[in-house]
Image (spheres, rainbow, N blue to C red):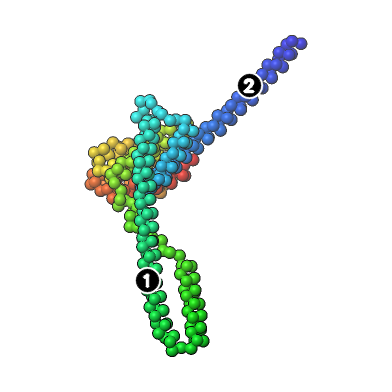
Amino acid sequence: MIKKIMITLLIFIMISTSCSNSEQKDEKANSTLVNKSLKYQLVNITDEIINLLEKKDYIKCYDELMDFHEKANEVGIYYITDNDENAVDFKALINELSKNISDEADKQKIQKVAIDVEKSQIKLLTQMASEGGGKEESSGSQGEDSSKSSGSSESEESSDDSSSSSESESSSGKSESEPSEEIILPQEELLKNYPELVTTDNDLAIQNKASDLYKYCSYILTLEENDKKAGLIKLKYYLYKIKNLAKLKKFDDIGKFYTKLESEWKMELENAQKVSEKDAKIVNSIIDNLMSQIKEKNIPVIDISNKIAVKSINNLIDKTS
Protein backbone atom coordinates (compact mmCIF):
# COMPACT_ATOMS: atom_id res chain seq x y z
CA MET A 1 0.00 0.00 0.00
CA ILE A 2 2.75 2.40 1.00
CA LYS A 3 4.63 1.43 -2.13
CA LYS A 4 1.65 2.36 -4.32
CA ILE A 5 1.30 5.70 -2.58
CA MET A 6 4.99 6.43 -3.08
CA ILE A 7 4.79 5.55 -6.77
CA THR A 8 1.71 7.75 -7.22
CA LEU A 9 3.42 10.62 -5.39
CA LEU A 10 6.55 10.23 -7.49
CA ILE A 11 4.54 10.33 -10.72
CA PHE A 12 2.73 13.44 -9.51
CA ILE A 13 6.02 15.17 -8.70
CA MET A 14 7.46 14.27 -12.11
CA ILE A 15 4.40 15.65 -13.91
CA SER A 16 4.47 18.84 -11.84
CA THR A 17 8.17 19.32 -12.48
CA SER A 18 7.70 18.73 -16.19
CA CYS A 19 4.89 21.31 -16.37
CA SER A 20 6.93 23.79 -14.38
CA ASN A 21 9.96 23.35 -16.65
CA SER A 22 7.76 23.75 -19.71
CA GLU A 23 6.29 26.99 -18.36
CA GLN A 24 9.75 28.31 -17.53
CA LYS A 25 10.96 27.51 -21.05
CA ASP A 26 7.96 29.30 -22.56
CA GLU A 27 8.55 32.33 -20.35
CA LYS A 28 12.23 32.36 -21.25
CA ALA A 29 11.42 32.07 -24.96
CA ASN A 30 8.91 34.92 -24.77
CA SER A 31 11.36 37.03 -22.78
CA THR A 32 14.06 36.39 -25.39
CA LEU A 33 11.76 37.43 -28.23
CA VAL A 34 10.76 40.64 -26.45
CA ASN A 35 14.37 41.41 -25.62
CA LYS A 36 15.48 40.83 -29.20
CA SER A 37 12.65 42.98 -30.53
CA LEU A 38 13.74 45.83 -28.25
CA LYS A 39 17.29 45.54 -29.56
CA TYR A 40 16.08 45.86 -33.15
CA GLN A 41 14.04 48.89 -32.08
CA LEU A 42 17.27 50.44 -30.86
CA VAL A 43 18.70 50.04 -34.35
CA ASN A 44 15.67 51.77 -35.89
CA ILE A 45 15.92 54.62 -33.38
CA THR A 46 19.62 54.99 -34.19
CA ASP A 47 18.71 55.30 -37.89
CA GLU A 48 16.32 58.12 -37.01
CA ILE A 49 18.86 59.85 -34.76
CA ILE A 50 21.46 59.83 -37.54
CA ASN A 51 18.88 61.10 -40.03
CA LEU A 52 17.80 63.96 -37.75
CA LEU A 53 21.39 64.92 -36.97
CA GLU A 54 22.17 65.19 -40.67
CA LYS A 55 19.14 67.48 -40.98
CA LYS A 56 20.35 69.45 -37.93
CA ASP A 57 17.03 68.90 -36.21
CA TYR A 58 18.39 68.69 -32.68
CA ILE A 59 15.05 69.27 -30.96
CA LYS A 60 13.46 66.11 -32.39
CA CYS A 61 16.76 64.28 -32.16
CA TYR A 62 16.92 64.80 -28.41
CA ASP A 63 13.50 63.15 -28.03
CA GLU A 64 14.68 60.17 -30.08
CA LEU A 65 17.82 59.87 -27.98
CA MET A 66 15.75 59.78 -24.80
CA ASP A 67 13.64 57.03 -26.38
CA PHE A 68 16.84 55.12 -27.14
CA HIS A 69 18.00 55.57 -23.56
CA GLU A 70 14.70 54.30 -22.19
CA LYS A 71 14.64 51.19 -24.37
CA ALA A 72 18.30 50.48 -23.65
CA ASN A 73 17.39 50.38 -19.97
CA GLU A 74 14.60 47.93 -20.78
CA VAL A 75 17.09 45.74 -22.59
CA GLY A 76 19.18 45.86 -19.45
CA ILE A 77 22.62 46.01 -21.05
CA TYR A 78 23.52 49.49 -19.93
CA TYR A 79 27.17 49.42 -19.07
CA ILE A 80 29.68 46.99 -20.58
CA THR A 81 33.06 46.82 -18.87
CA ASP A 82 34.88 43.81 -20.30
CA ASN A 83 38.04 43.91 -22.40
CA ASP A 84 36.30 43.14 -25.68
CA GLU A 85 37.31 45.76 -28.26
CA ASN A 86 33.78 45.65 -29.65
CA ALA A 87 32.25 46.47 -26.29
CA VAL A 88 30.87 49.96 -25.77
CA ASP A 89 30.94 52.11 -22.67
CA PHE A 90 27.29 52.93 -23.13
CA LYS A 91 27.04 55.06 -20.02
CA ALA A 92 29.77 57.42 -21.21
CA LEU A 93 28.39 57.41 -24.77
CA ILE A 94 24.81 58.26 -23.85
CA ASN A 95 25.89 60.92 -21.36
CA GLU A 96 28.11 62.69 -23.89
CA LEU A 97 25.52 62.53 -26.65
CA SER A 98 22.74 63.71 -24.35
CA LYS A 99 24.73 66.76 -23.31
CA ASN A 100 25.85 67.67 -26.83
CA ILE A 101 22.45 67.21 -28.44
CA SER A 102 20.66 68.94 -25.55
CA ASP A 103 22.95 71.97 -25.86
CA GLU A 104 22.30 72.23 -29.59
CA ALA A 105 18.56 71.72 -29.10
CA ASP A 106 18.47 74.62 -26.63
CA LYS A 107 20.28 76.83 -29.14
CA GLN A 108 17.74 75.93 -31.81
CA LYS A 109 14.85 76.75 -29.48
CA ILE A 110 16.32 80.21 -28.90
CA GLN A 111 16.82 80.65 -32.65
CA LYS A 112 13.23 79.58 -33.27
CA VAL A 113 11.92 82.22 -30.86
CA ALA A 114 14.08 84.87 -32.56
CA ILE A 115 12.76 83.81 -35.97
CA ASP A 116 9.15 83.94 -34.75
CA VAL A 117 9.73 87.47 -33.40
CA GLU A 118 11.26 88.58 -36.70
CA LYS A 119 8.31 87.11 -38.61
CA SER A 120 5.86 88.95 -36.36
CA GLN A 121 7.67 92.22 -36.98
CA ILE A 122 7.60 91.66 -40.75
CA LYS A 123 3.87 90.88 -40.63
CA LEU A 124 3.19 94.00 -38.57
CA LEU A 125 5.17 96.24 -40.92
CA THR A 126 3.45 94.68 -43.94
CA GLN A 127 0.04 95.22 -42.38
CA MET A 128 0.82 98.84 -41.50
CA ALA A 129 2.06 99.53 -45.02
CA SER A 130 -1.05 97.93 -46.48
CA GLU A 131 -3.39 99.94 -44.25
CA GLY A 132 -1.53 103.17 -45.01
CA GLY A 133 -1.87 102.62 -48.75
CA GLY A 134 -5.55 101.86 -48.34
CA LYS A 135 -6.19 105.12 -46.49
CA GLU A 136 -4.47 107.20 -49.16
CA GLU A 137 -6.49 105.50 -51.88
CA SER A 138 -9.70 106.00 -49.91
CA SER A 139 -8.95 109.70 -49.36
CA GLY A 140 -8.31 110.31 -53.05
CA SER A 141 -11.47 108.47 -53.98
CA GLN A 142 -13.55 110.52 -51.56
CA GLY A 143 -12.23 113.82 -52.99
CA GLU A 144 -13.07 112.73 -56.50
CA ASP A 145 -16.54 111.59 -55.48
CA SER A 146 -17.12 114.92 -53.73
CA SER A 147 -16.36 116.97 -56.85
CA LYS A 148 -18.58 114.76 -58.96
CA SER A 149 -21.46 114.79 -56.50
CA SER A 150 -21.93 118.59 -56.73
CA GLY A 151 -23.50 118.21 -60.17
CA SER A 152 -25.51 115.09 -59.42
CA SER A 153 -29.03 114.58 -58.14
CA GLU A 154 -29.86 113.19 -54.70
CA SER A 155 -31.12 109.96 -56.22
CA GLU A 156 -27.85 109.48 -58.08
CA GLU A 157 -25.92 110.18 -54.89
CA SER A 158 -27.98 107.58 -53.08
CA SER A 159 -27.42 105.09 -55.86
CA ASP A 160 -23.68 105.77 -55.96
CA ASP A 161 -23.38 105.50 -52.19
CA SER A 162 -25.25 102.21 -52.20
CA SER A 163 -23.07 100.85 -55.00
CA SER A 164 -19.90 102.12 -53.34
CA SER A 165 -20.91 100.57 -50.04
CA SER A 166 -21.66 97.27 -51.73
CA GLU A 167 -18.31 97.26 -53.52
CA SER A 168 -16.51 98.19 -50.32
CA GLU A 169 -18.14 95.35 -48.41
CA SER A 170 -17.38 92.94 -51.24
CA SER A 171 -13.77 94.08 -51.36
CA SER A 172 -13.47 93.84 -47.59
CA GLY A 173 -14.95 90.37 -47.55
CA LYS A 174 -12.61 89.26 -50.30
CA SER A 175 -9.62 90.68 -48.48
CA GLU A 176 -10.55 88.92 -45.25
CA SER A 177 -11.10 85.60 -47.00
CA GLU A 178 -7.68 85.64 -48.64
CA PRO A 179 -5.11 83.84 -46.45
CA SER A 180 -1.95 85.76 -45.66
CA GLU A 181 1.18 84.45 -47.32
CA GLU A 182 3.47 82.42 -45.08
CA ILE A 183 6.70 84.17 -44.28
CA ILE A 184 9.80 82.01 -44.65
CA LEU A 185 13.12 83.54 -43.73
CA PRO A 186 16.29 82.66 -45.67
CA GLN A 187 17.88 80.90 -42.70
CA GLU A 188 14.81 78.67 -42.38
CA GLU A 189 14.84 77.76 -46.05
CA LEU A 190 18.55 77.00 -45.93
CA LEU A 191 18.27 74.73 -42.89
CA LYS A 192 15.19 72.95 -44.23
CA ASN A 193 16.40 72.23 -47.75
CA TYR A 194 20.19 72.45 -47.60
CA PRO A 195 21.32 71.56 -44.05
CA GLU A 196 24.69 70.37 -45.35
CA LEU A 197 25.54 73.97 -46.25
CA VAL A 198 25.23 75.09 -42.63
CA THR A 199 26.76 71.99 -41.02
CA THR A 200 29.67 72.83 -38.74
CA ASP A 201 32.56 70.72 -37.49
CA ASN A 202 30.74 70.50 -34.18
CA ASP A 203 27.71 69.04 -35.96
CA LEU A 204 29.94 66.50 -37.68
CA ALA A 205 31.63 65.58 -34.40
CA ILE A 206 28.22 64.88 -32.85
CA GLN A 207 27.22 62.79 -35.88
CA ASN A 208 30.47 60.87 -35.57
CA LYS A 209 29.85 60.16 -31.91
CA ALA A 210 26.23 59.16 -32.58
CA SER A 211 27.39 56.53 -35.07
CA ASP A 212 28.85 54.68 -32.07
CA LEU A 213 25.25 53.77 -31.23
CA TYR A 214 25.43 51.33 -34.16
CA LYS A 215 28.45 49.72 -32.54
CA TYR A 216 26.50 49.34 -29.31
CA CYS A 217 23.47 47.87 -31.13
CA SER A 218 25.66 45.44 -33.02
CA TYR A 219 27.44 44.36 -29.87
CA ILE A 220 24.32 43.63 -27.85
CA LEU A 221 22.89 41.66 -30.78
CA THR A 222 25.99 39.47 -30.93
CA LEU A 223 25.02 38.36 -27.44
CA GLU A 224 21.87 36.86 -28.97
CA GLU A 225 22.09 33.28 -30.12
CA ASN A 226 22.13 32.84 -33.91
CA ASP A 227 21.51 36.51 -34.69
CA LYS A 228 22.17 37.19 -38.37
CA LYS A 229 21.91 40.98 -38.44
CA ALA A 230 24.61 42.09 -36.01
CA GLY A 231 27.35 41.94 -38.65
CA LEU A 232 25.31 43.99 -41.12
CA ILE A 233 24.68 46.64 -38.46
CA LYS A 234 28.40 46.71 -37.74
CA LEU A 235 29.00 47.45 -41.44
CA LYS A 236 26.80 50.54 -41.09
CA TYR A 237 28.87 51.60 -38.10
CA TYR A 238 32.12 51.38 -40.07
CA LEU A 239 30.65 53.18 -43.08
CA TYR A 240 29.37 56.08 -40.99
CA LYS A 241 32.68 56.37 -39.15
CA ILE A 242 34.51 56.57 -42.48
CA LYS A 243 32.12 59.18 -43.85
CA ASN A 244 32.12 61.37 -40.75
CA LEU A 245 35.88 61.22 -40.28
CA ALA A 246 36.34 62.13 -43.95
CA LYS A 247 34.08 65.16 -43.53
CA LEU A 248 36.07 66.11 -40.44
CA LYS A 249 39.20 65.68 -42.61
CA LYS A 250 40.63 63.12 -40.17
CA PHE A 251 41.85 60.81 -42.91
CA ASP A 252 44.62 59.33 -40.76
CA ASP A 253 41.97 57.81 -38.50
CA ILE A 254 40.00 56.19 -41.32
CA GLY A 255 42.36 53.32 -42.17
CA LYS A 256 41.51 51.11 -39.19
CA PHE A 257 37.79 51.44 -39.86
CA TYR A 258 38.21 50.55 -43.53
CA THR A 259 40.25 47.46 -42.58
CA LYS A 260 37.48 46.34 -40.21
CA LEU A 261 34.82 47.14 -42.80
CA GLU A 262 36.59 45.01 -45.39
CA SER A 263 37.11 42.15 -42.94
CA GLU A 264 33.50 42.19 -41.70
CA TRP A 265 32.15 42.28 -45.25
CA LYS A 266 34.15 39.20 -46.21
CA MET A 267 32.40 37.35 -43.40
CA GLU A 268 28.97 38.65 -44.43
CA LEU A 269 29.33 38.39 -48.22
CA GLU A 270 28.22 34.79 -48.71
CA ASN A 271 25.05 35.16 -46.64
CA ALA A 272 24.34 38.56 -48.18
CA GLN A 273 24.46 37.06 -51.68
CA LYS A 274 21.87 34.47 -50.63
CA VAL A 275 19.61 37.18 -49.24
CA SER A 276 19.91 39.64 -52.14
CA GLU A 277 22.46 39.23 -54.88
CA LYS A 278 21.75 42.74 -56.18
CA ASP A 279 22.33 44.50 -52.85
CA ALA A 280 25.36 42.35 -52.08
CA LYS A 281 26.87 43.30 -55.43
CA ILE A 282 26.31 47.01 -54.75
CA VAL A 283 27.91 46.86 -51.30
CA ASN A 284 30.80 44.79 -52.60
CA SER A 285 31.51 47.25 -55.40
CA ILE A 286 31.41 50.26 -53.08
CA ILE A 287 33.74 48.70 -50.52
CA ASP A 288 36.17 47.72 -53.30
CA ASN A 289 36.31 51.32 -54.56
CA LEU A 290 36.15 53.08 -51.22
CA MET A 291 39.85 52.96 -50.41
CA SER A 292 40.78 54.78 -53.62
CA GLN A 293 38.26 57.49 -52.72
CA ILE A 294 39.78 57.75 -49.25
CA LYS A 295 43.29 58.07 -50.69
CA GLU A 296 42.07 60.81 -53.03
CA LYS A 297 40.28 62.47 -50.08
CA ASN A 298 37.22 62.72 -52.29
CA ILE A 299 34.68 63.65 -49.63
CA PRO A 300 31.62 64.15 -51.91
CA VAL A 301 32.08 60.70 -53.48
CA ILE A 302 32.66 59.10 -50.07
CA ASP A 303 29.40 60.68 -48.91
CA ILE A 304 27.49 59.36 -51.94
CA SER A 305 29.06 55.91 -51.57
CA ASN A 306 27.98 55.84 -47.93
CA LYS A 307 24.37 56.61 -48.78
CA ILE A 308 24.19 53.96 -51.50
CA ALA A 309 25.91 51.30 -49.39
CA VAL A 310 23.78 52.00 -46.31
CA LYS A 311 20.62 51.78 -48.41
CA SER A 312 21.63 48.34 -49.71
CA ILE A 313 22.68 47.18 -46.24
CA ASN A 314 19.29 48.26 -44.90
CA ASN A 315 17.68 46.17 -47.64
CA LEU A 316 19.78 43.20 -46.57
CA ILE A 317 18.83 43.72 -42.93
CA ASP A 318 15.13 43.88 -43.80
CA LYS A 319 15.34 40.70 -45.89
CA THR A 320 17.39 38.76 -43.34
CA SER A 321 15.35 36.58 -41.01
Residue 266 in sight in this render: no
Residue 193 picture quarter: bottom left
Residue 25 picture quarter: top right
Which residue is disc 1 drawn over? 133
Residue type beneath disc 2: Thr
Viewer-proximal residue, 38 or 58?
A: 58
* Residue 285, position as x, y percentages in the image: 33, 47
Identify the residue at horizontal 32%, vertical 44% (top origin): 203
Viewer-proximal residue, 15 or 80?
A: 80
* Residue 43, position as x, y percentages in the image: 43, 40
Q: Is residue 9 left or right of residue 298?
A: right
- State the mark number for residue 17: 2
- State the mark number for residue 75: none
Residue 303 in sight in this render: yes
- Marks 2 and 1, how far apart at CA: 91 Å
Query: Taking 179 as reference, is 260 above or below it?
Result: above
Closer to us: mark 2 or mark 1?
1
Query: Taking 183 as reference, is 169 above or below it?
Result: below
* Residue 244, position as x, y percentages in the image: 31, 43
Residue type beneath disc 1: Gly
For marks 2 and 1, the one nearer the N-term is 2
Q: Circle 2 — which element?
A: helix
Q: Circle 1 — which element?
A: helix
Identify the residue at horizontal 40%, vertical 44% (top origin): 61
Viewer-proximal residue, 219 or 59?
A: 59
Viewer-proximal residue, 75 or 226?
A: 75
